Image (cartoon, helix red, strand yellow):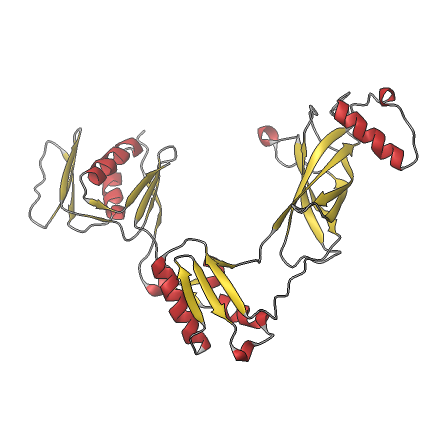
Amino acid sequence: MIKLISILIILAAGFQADAARLKDISSIRGVRENQLIGYGIVVGLKGTGDGKSEFTTKSLVRMLDKVGVKLDNQDITSKNVAAVIVSASLPAFAKAGNPLDITVSTIGDAQSLQGGTLLMSPLRAANDQVYAVAQGTVIISGDGKDVHPTAGRIPNGAIIEKDIQADFSNRKMFRLTLHNPDFTTAARAVLTVNKELGGQYASAKDAGTIDIITPAAFENRGVELMATIESIEINPDGRAVVIINEKTGTVVVGDRVRISKVAVSHGSLSVKVATPGDAKKTTEEKVAVLDTGANVGELVQSMNKLGVTPKDLITILQSIKAAGALHGELEIL
């Protein structure tokens, strides 16, 4: 059975269709998550732990020593314990007392963390300061073959111990960073923000950076200013691109991609992009005829009607690109 090509996305043209909020296409410089990491031990396993791993044994001895139990390393041979790395993401503006989801992953030869309990583990940031403490029952997700028993999660498994200090509301200037840098998008954002704020407060430093000076009306009201700016909608621009996934037969097409006058012959298939009346169908070949300026979406739809396979489509598009008739970037995954 011939596998037909599917068009996953054809980006629509037009301001209203493409309009996006600034909060969805940019981020505020300095407002981001911070990664936390820690070392801990999971107990209560059903014989699936690290066994007599040296670092696990030493960790268990130190932990028991803190609670008043004195043991020699040789006295511990339990396979019900596993050494793990604990990781989490500390959100911006995090406050002490808030919970965090954490991920627990084995670092030894443990077979499974199913049913285990993580003991109190401090979580540190890159500056080596402790920002949270984790503890709780490990949950292994998945079903059947999808189960990955050496890693699990603990929802709300950590408590934040320290506030993230940020003098946000009193800022005199804010900087937005576009997720996909583009000069046209940056220029449109500046024009729209200035129109919304009623003055020349925004300026583009480059294709991905927009600086905004706090207007007098928003002095000491940075939260309200950002709420206003984030809700502004603009029409982001982007590259003309075609992305093909050969394994799945999926084609992602940008609406700006165009094809000039060209003719391609591939096996029993002919593809002709020409002005109306230039191309004539024959009874010997499968022929796809498109008008000059046709987009790749129209080409793919024509290929589907002729039963073209993903492999053949990739060859055809590569040939058209090599001939200089496909105006846009072609990416194959």
- Please give the name of the residue rendered at 61% of the width and 35% of the height, measured from the top-left corner: 142
Expressed as whole percent of the image width and height from the top left, the position of residue 230 reads 50, 66
Using the rendered image of the protein, determine whether residue 120 is visible from the camera's viewpoint: yes
Q: How many circles with numbers are drawn on the protein?
A: 0
Q: Quadrant of residue 147?
A: top right
- Vertically, is 273 above or below 200? above
Q: Residue at x 22, y 40 (%)?
A: 321
Q: Position of residue 89 (x, y in %)?
A: 63, 48
User: With 297 as the anchor, is 219 left or right in this view?
Assistant: right
Q: Residue at x 21, y 36 (%)?
A: 319
Q: Nearer the viewer, residue 144 or 206?
A: 206
Please provide percent x and percent y for residue 311: 29, 31
- Residue 116 visible? The answer is no
219 lies left or right of 302? right
**Looking at the image, residue 116 lies above or below residue 206:** above
Instruction: Identify which residue, 237 or 68, lies in the foreground.
Output: 68
State the residue in front, 99 or 215: 215
Q: Is residue 253 above or below residue 200?
A: above
